[in-house]
Amino acid sequence: MFLKFKVPRGTSDVVFEKAEKKQLVEDTAITMFERFGYRPIITPTFEHTELFQRGIGENTDIVQKEMYTFKDKGGRSLTLRPEGTAPVVRAYLENGLASRSLPVKLYYCGQMFRYERPQAGRYREFWQLGVEAIGTKDAFIDAEVILLLVRIFEEMGIKDLELHLNSMGCPGCRKSFSEALRKYLADKIEHLCEDCQKRARMNPLRVFDCKVRGCQSAIKDAPLISNFWCEDCCNHFETVKGLLNDMGVSYILNPALVRGFDYYTKTTFEVRTESLGAQNALGGGGRYDGLVEEFGGQSTQAIGFAIGTERVIMAMEILNENFSAGSKIDVFVASIGEARKNGFKILDSLRKMGISADMDYAERSLKGQMKLSDKLKASHVMILGPDELKRGNCLIRDMKSGEQTEIKLTDISLWAKNCFKK
RNA sequence: GUGGUUGUAGCUCAGUUGGUUAGAGCGUUGGACUGUGGCUCCAAAGGUCGGGGGUUCGAGUCCCCUCAGCCACCCCA
């Protein structure tokens, strides 16, 4: 079909079953967020560009090439948010949330934007569900946040997950580590691929997760972050691991787990699944103890994660055979001829009782209306024709058993109450 | 940004070495069944063959460009 307009690249319309599945995933996650004591926060879809440049880091891929940045009519440079943490931290400061009892535990659900080439599990507009716990350095909160992530996937019935765990250390240990790593890589520079030669200068940690074989063997004996943790970082990580052990949460220690934002410190984690193809991270996050200060606040420690909603839906479709979401209605009001007006009234009264009800709006025959009822998965059909009306009655058909009974119009609410326990 | 691959009905796909009015299944609507769903049968509606240009007497089919989907790299949710 010739269409004048199509969705922009990397975006999509979400309708019917897909939209219902998305709602189901979001409802499940939000229920868990609230069960863990997190409260909602809604921030704007766009922010001042500098917020992300400063927050995520000037040298990151996101800031370098993936932001949707535009100038508004006042000449301000604005950017559609590529992630949720920096905006939440900004809002934390701007709304004086530091004066609340700490930590402030927040959750969000919203779309993010990154200008990337679309592929499986990656879109230019995508949805994230995330939490941020701001205002404590307690290792127990690390454990809680990771536990929350794990419990959400359990609740959704997604199994065969890998929880990858690492610590980036504090700025102190990170500095000595990255110096050592830089020195090591400088000696190996001719064995590295073109990209990694650049990485060795800009962001040496990145060399760890390069897939080129030459690079992998070149870094086989590279220094590991774990050898550079200071005592505090070491103790913190030990506590987190211990708490996860106590909770029966298994994890994979992954010193190569390097996340894409500059603000991460200490604990970082990611949940992966084999079933999704190249984009295998369902969710991930970490501690960011310096970000609040970076934005002008007092020294404040914090941690959070984000879940990719579309990826979770994909995973559930693959791993969870009976993952389906469909709507069904309680009563379809089928009417014939003049009785349509009476039907419309009854429809309204049923809905007022909290019963989901619908009728025909395409002037279908009774047969057509029955077919439609079937498609809408109505549990009962109310049939209203001239004959029934003359008797002051209506017919109720149970769509499962096929049984039909005739009841008085004045008894409809009584019937509905008994039938649907409303 | 780079590479591979695919674009034919709402969906999934046939379409011969280029040759009349481009097909099927599912879905939609109607009928068989004058007022009763699911099953069956029948029928109808629905196509600038992604878009543009070229080769040719003739292009869904061959060539070029472009757009989009999918997959991978980079990176991440």
Image (cartoon, rainbow, N blue to C red):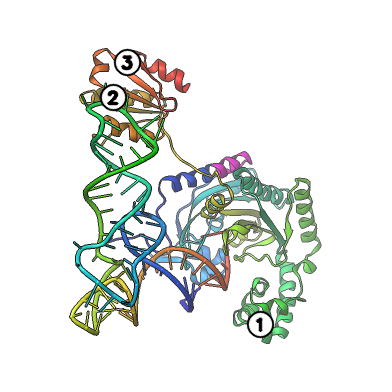
Look at the image and give the residue range highlighted in magenta: A28-39
Q: Secondary structure at mark 1?
A: loop
Label 2 SS = helix
Residue that mark 2 sits on: A343
Q: Are marks 2 and 1 in contact (CB under 8 Å)?
A: no
Query: What's the chain of the residue with tag 3?
Result: A
Residue A398 pos. (x, y %): 41, 24
Provide the chain ID for the residue under circle 2: A
Q: Can I make out residue A159 in this image?
A: yes
Could you tell me residue A10's position as x and y percent?
A: 43, 62
Specify which label sits upstream in the sequence, 2 or 3. Answer: 2
Along the line of sight, which residue is nearer the eye, A9 or A244? A9
Q: Main secondary structure of the magenta part?
A: helix
- Using the image, tell me which numbered label, if any, was put on residue A207: none
Q: Is residue A35 magenta?
A: yes
> In the drawing, what numbered circle is on residue A192?
1
Q: Distance of mark 2 from mark 3, alpha carbons?
A: 11 Å
Picture residue at 59% right of the left edge, 79% below the top = A195
**How many angstroms separate mark 3 from mark 1 (CA)?**
82 Å
Residue A144 shown in magenta: no
Say which amino acid is labelled 1. Leu
